[in-house]
Image (cartoon, coloured by chain):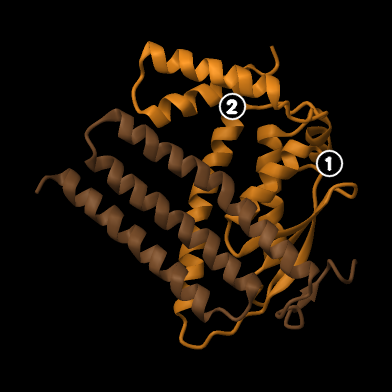
Amino acid sequence: MSALDVVSAVLLLAGVLFSVVAGIGLVRLPDVFSRMHAATKPATLGLLLILLGTALRVDSGGDVAKLVLVGAFTFLTAPVGAHVLGRSAYRSGVGGLDELVVDELRDPQ
Amino acid sequence: MRRLPLVLWLTAVWVGLWGSLTVANVAGGLAIALVLVRSLPLTDVPDRAVVEPVALLRFAGYFLVDLVRSSVQVTLLVLRPRLQLRQAVVAVPVLGASDSLLTLLANAISLTPGTLTLEVDRPASTLYVHVIDVGDDLDAVRADLAAVERLAILAVGSRDCRRGLAGEGRA
């Protein structure tokens, strides 16, 4: 096993770990808003690590280019998706709003 | 031609998707990019973003570190045996309502520790941000957000934004 294999394996495993955590977060966290946090951050990083780990193992530069594009589009779309979901949830007043410690959108300072 | 960066980006995506750099791929990508840009014009962004390459790189670096930090933070939160969150929605005033700045900032905030952009108030140039766990220190969260704002302005802010930043002694 070469050093590259080890690095690639570590990246893949770390990516899987973050992806699992994102899944657990979706189940354990109490409301839409906190769940969006789990769906954006660890999920994005997890995917990124998996892409990196894969990029180290593929032979052709063309495949690496595709992996880079997957990463770039995830970066561009994941926060936008989370923002739109969070915003619609807030506007339609779904559960979780009562538990806010501070809400400056409702009570401007 | 003002649309040149967009055409180049679309061509690069096309070539990347085909996976090989050949004359035919580049020509095909260029042709399709030109047709797309001609037939589906984007709305004009009125503000002139002044892109500083070095500051943009610094922003990207900070952003990557933050992505790792935030993922670890959410991981610890999620795996905590007793889940107790103090959630909040905080207003983040942004200097100058430039569209490119607000977009970059809203996206960056969504991927940085504990914060998620919830609402954008463009006329007031304010972002409303959901904080998953404020702990006891709301001011620390505000300081974090102001730091991201500062880096974003230094990277793509208009001249007015930069002047505002300097005026507040933060440049």
Q: Residue at x 68, y 75 (%)?
A: B87
Category of crowding for the residue at label 2, using alpha-carbon neighbours closer than 10 angstroms: few (below 14), some (14–19), many (at least 20):
few
Q: Residue at x 67, y 68 (%)?
A: B131
Q: Quadrant of residue A65?
A: top left
Residue A23: percent from left, percent from top = 45, 71
Q: Which numbered disc covers residue B53?
A: 2
Q: Which numbered disc covers residue A21?
A: none
Answer above or below: position of B47 versus A80: above
Quarter of the picture holding the C terminus of chain B: top right
Residue on which the image places disc 1:
B97
Q: Quadrant of residue B88?
A: bottom right
Q: Amino acid at mark 2?
A: Pro
Q: Nearer the viewer, mark 1 or mark 2?
A: 1
Quarter of the picture holding the N terminus of chain B: top right
Category of crowding for the residue at label 1, using alpha-carbon neighbours closer than 10 angstroms: few (below 14), some (14–19), many (at least 20):
many
Badge 2 element:
helix
State whether discs 1 and 2 lie on one chain: yes
Q: Amino acid at mark 1?
A: Ala
Q: CA distance from mark 1 to mark 2?
A: 21 Å
Badge 1 element:
loop
* Colour of chain A in the rendered structure image: brown
Q: Residue at x 42, y 70 (%)?
A: A21
Chain-order first, disc 1 or disc 2: 2
| Chain letter of the residue beneath label 2 in the structure image | B
The orange one among the chains is B
Residue A34: percent from left, percent from top = 61, 72
Left or right: where does residue B148 sit relative to residue B9?
right
Which of the pair A3/A94 is nearer the observer?
A: A94
Residue B100: percent from left, percent from top = 73, 37
